[in-house]
Image (tube, rainbow, N blue to C red):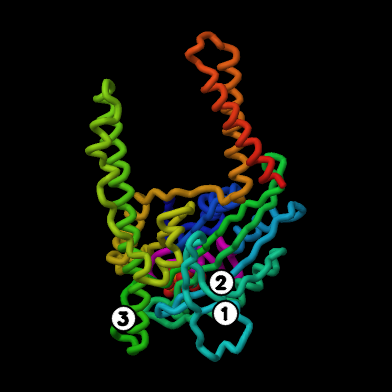
């Protein structure tokens, strides 16, 4: 996981965009899932960084602008959705219905695609103005309230998601790579101020429930990643010191067999929805926003501690390519490998012990793979 600290009022968005926004774009264009989330106390600049203001464009519209530019003329397309999590409930920020009625969407989990929000509206975005409209509509629908330091504080966690699909040619076959880009503006991390009304306190404890779970998830993932890397180095030391009998000791004492800590993703809606982004198939960036005010010292330390933990997480991103095209690519690689082996057997052909059996097996495997590829090609 990459991360960056941003000091309130010190950096302007273009610099943040050059540092982090371009990484999001290059990951998405290569076909990886990407997540960018801003964490910090109220009023420290999360919304300013992620969404911007009329005077200063934030990361989300900047990233969308370049993605849309990339789409033109390539057969690529995108869908956008915008949701908020308020007091552990999911609301669609772009649902064009009677918004006075409070309604909650359910989070479900697909065995392959992971957690998703059932019934969340998806919007085709084919030009930049459409993105701006969606963002403006969503931001206007977001729940805000006055806190002790910020009179229009976002009380919910907002997730703007883009499903970016690119049409490509791979192995002379038309294919698609799809990347999911999660741009997350979290609610302020401060505790509820007892001077505010009762609702604010209940709301604050629910905001904190998500953020506390996020903290637990981040630190547990970091511990697991550290445990995994220390086990790997122990294994490599063991295998270096045991060249005569490779692997026999190390596998028995292998740290890989050490139990990993359980990750409580489902303890909050936020961590459940961001499950893949936090510890799975995603390139993830955390932006930690802090205030320069000395009165915010405690909050700043806590934010930096969060970020320091997050830095230790090692995700496993992979390109989301079409499953059939991936299979064909792997089979073709295998065919090339088998052909090379067969050729080297034929060329050498030096001993009857390199029996016709082996040759026959290779030829048979080669034939089977070519058959599979030709079947998949149609
Ligand atoms: N780098 C900056 N330059 C100029 N103004 C900024 C900057 N960062 C934040 N602000 C201003 O500070 C105020 C608070 O910022 P913002 O709404 O982004 O805070 P936040 O962290 O999202 O707060 P909350 O968690 O309460 O929603 C806003 O008026 C915003 O325009």
Q: Quadrant of residue 128?
A: bottom right
Q: Identify which residue, 2 or 257, lies in the foreground.
A: 257
Give the mark nearest the N terminus, 3 or 1: 1
Relative placement, left or right, of 132 versus 191 is right
- Disc 3: CA contacts within 10 A as few (<14), some (14-19) or many (>=20): few
Does any portion of residue 195 appear in the rendered image?
Answer: yes
Q: Quadrant of residue 301?
A: bottom left
Kindly identify the residue that appears in the image at 28 percent across and 28 percent down.
239
Q: Identify which residue, 311 or 32, lies in the foreground.
A: 32
Kindly identify the residue that appears in the image at 32 percent across and 52 percent down.
222
Q: Separation of disc 3 and disc 1 at Cα?
A: 25 Å
Give the mark nearest the N terminus, 2 or 3: 2
Q: Separation of disc 2 and disc 3 at Cα?
A: 28 Å
Q: Identify which residue, 112 or 138, lies in the foreground.
A: 112
Residue 378 position, x and y percent, is 72, 47
Which residue is tagged 1?
A: 140
Q: Nearer the viewer, mark 2 or mark 1?
A: 2
Does any portion of residue 15 appear in the rendered image?
Answer: no
Residue 318 position, x and y percent, is 51, 48
Element marked by disc 1: helix
Vertical comparison of 18 with 292: above or below:
above
Which residue is tagged 2?
A: 82
Does the magenta-highlighted stretch encompass residue 262? no
- Specify start and end residues of the magenta stretch as a single range: 39-60
Give the number of the disc on residue 193. 3
């Amino acid at each position: 996981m990459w991360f960056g600290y941003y000091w309130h009022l010190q950096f302007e968005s273009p610099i943040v965009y050059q540092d982090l926004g371009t990484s999001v774009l290059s990951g998405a264009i290569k076909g990886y899932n990407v997540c960018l989330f801003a964490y910090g106390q109220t009023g420290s600049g999360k919304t300013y960084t992620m969404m911007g203001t009329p005077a200063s464009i934030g990361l989300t519209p900047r990233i969308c602008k370049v993605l849309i530019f990339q789409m033109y003329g390539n057969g690529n397309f995108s869908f956008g959705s915008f949701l908020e999590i308020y007091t552990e409930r999911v609301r669609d920020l772009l649902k064009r219905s009677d918004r006075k009625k409070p309604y909650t969407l359910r989070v479900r989990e697909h065995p392959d695609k992971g957690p998703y929000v059932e019934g969340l509206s998806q919007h085709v975005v084919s030009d930049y103005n459409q993105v701006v409209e969606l963002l403006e509509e969503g931001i206007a629908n977001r729940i805000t309230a006055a806190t002790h330091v910020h009179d229009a504080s976002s009380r919910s966690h907002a997730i703007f998601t883009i499903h970016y699909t690119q049409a490509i040619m791979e192995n002379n076959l038309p294919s698609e790579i799809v990347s999911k880009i999660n741009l997350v503006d979290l609610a302020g991390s401060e505790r509820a101020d007892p001077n505010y009304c009762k609702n604010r306190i209940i709301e604050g404890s629910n905001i904190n429930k998500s953020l506390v779970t996020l903290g637990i998830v981040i630190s547990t993932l970091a511990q697991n990643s550290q445990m995994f890397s220390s086990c790997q180095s122990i294994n490599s030391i063991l295998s270096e010191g045991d060249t005569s009998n490779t692997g026999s000791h190390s596998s028995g004492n292998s740290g890989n067999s050490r139990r990993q800590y359980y990750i409580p993703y489902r303890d909050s809606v936020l961590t459940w929805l961001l499950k893949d982004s936090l510890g799975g198939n995603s390139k993830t960036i955390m932006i930690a926003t802090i205030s320069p005010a000395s009165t915010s010292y405690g909050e700043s330390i806590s934010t930096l501690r969060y970020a320091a933990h997050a830095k230790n997480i090692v995700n496993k991103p992979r390109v989301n390519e079409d499953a059939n095209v991936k299979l064909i690519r792997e089979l073709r690689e295998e065919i090339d490998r088998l052909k090379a082996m067969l050729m080297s057997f034929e060329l050498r052909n030096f001993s009857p012990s390199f029996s016709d059996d082996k040759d026959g097996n290779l030829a048979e495997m080669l034939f089977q793979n070519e058959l599979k590829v030709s079947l998949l090609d149609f």
